[in-house]
Image (tube, rainbow, N blue to C red):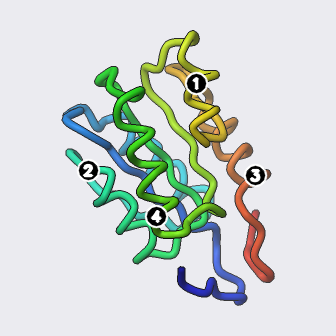
């Protein structure tokens, strides 16, 4: 695991589209909202494997990973992503998810280590606030 900087860096967030989900409009809206909120954003693009997401998180030294999924494959792909993050010792990274995740799956997704699930219609300001409040704190990191 890399050593995180202690300067006045903004929160770094990786937005990823795992699996074969080809719909990225919502993810791109979130990327823009996060940038407007002052976050440093890395967008992986479509069709990311769990290994690709974990490698990008490690290489980019992110504080937060946002998983956007609309395919319904969250119960199959999220455990693989969490395992890949653990294999790279990225257990201190906040993982959030959004998309079409049924309410009956939220407890299971949370048990995997996903901190929060944001469903369709969630206000962008609520997502930004949650990340500001829950992102791992590094000395000197700007949260506003």
Q: Residues within 10 Å of mark 2 (few under 14, many from 20)?
A: some
The residue that label 1 is drawn on is: 108
Dot 1 and dot 3 residues touching (CB under 8 Å): no
How far separated are the C-alphas under marks 1 and 3?
20 Å
How far separated are the C-alphas under marks 3 and 4?
23 Å
The quarter of the image holding the N terminus is bottom right
The residue that label 2 is drawn on is: 49
Q: Residues within 10 Å of mark 3 (few under 14, many from 20)?
A: few
Instruction: Out of 63 and 85, give the one closest to the viewer.
Output: 85
Mark closest to the chain's N terminus, 3 or 4? 4
Q: Residue at x 29, y 60 (%)?
A: 52
In the image, taking residue 94 as reference, residue 27 lies left or right, namely: left
Q: Residue at x 70, y 89 (%)?
A: 7
Task: Determine whether the residue tagged by mark 1 lies in a helix, strand or loop.
Answer: helix
Of labels 2 and 4, the one closer to you: 4
Of labels 1 and 4, the one closer to you: 4
Mark closest to the chain's N terminus, 2 or 3? 2
Mark closest to the chain's N terminus, 1 or 3? 1
Q: Residue at x 61, y 87 (%)?
A: 3
The residue that label 4 is drawn on is: 87
In the image, residue 93 above or below residue 109:
below
In the image, residue 60 above or below residue 99:
below
Dot 3 and dot 4 residues touching (CB under 8 Å): no
Task: Determine whether the residue tagged by mark 2 lies in a helix, strand or loop.
Answer: loop
In the image, residue 22 above or below residue 82:
above
- Residue 119: % across, % down: 54, 22
Instruction: Out of 9 and 6, give the one closest to the viewer.
Output: 6
How far separated are the C-alphas under marks 2 and 4?
15 Å
- Residue 79: % across, % down: 44, 39
- Residue 23: % across, % down: 25, 32
The residue that label 3 is drawn on is: 134
């Amino acid at each position: 695991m890399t050593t995180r900087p202690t300067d006045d860096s903004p929160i770094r967030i990786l937005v990823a589209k795992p699996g074969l989900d080809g719909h990225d409009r919502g993810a791109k809206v979130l990327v823009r909202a996060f940038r407007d909120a002052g976050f440093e954003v890395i967008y992986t693009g479509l069709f990311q494997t769990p290994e690709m997401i974990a490698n990008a998180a490690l290489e980019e030294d992110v504080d937060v990973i946002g998983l956007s999924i609309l395919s319904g494959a969250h119960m199959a792909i999220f455990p693989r992503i969490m395992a890949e993050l653990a294999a790279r010792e990225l257990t201190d990274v906040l993982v959030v998810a959004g998309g079409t995740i049924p309410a009956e799956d939220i407890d299971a997704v949370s048990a995997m280590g996903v901190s929060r699930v944001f469903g369709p219609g969630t206000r962008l300001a609520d997502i930004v606030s949650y990340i500001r409040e829950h992102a791992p704190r590094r000395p000197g990191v700007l949260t506003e």
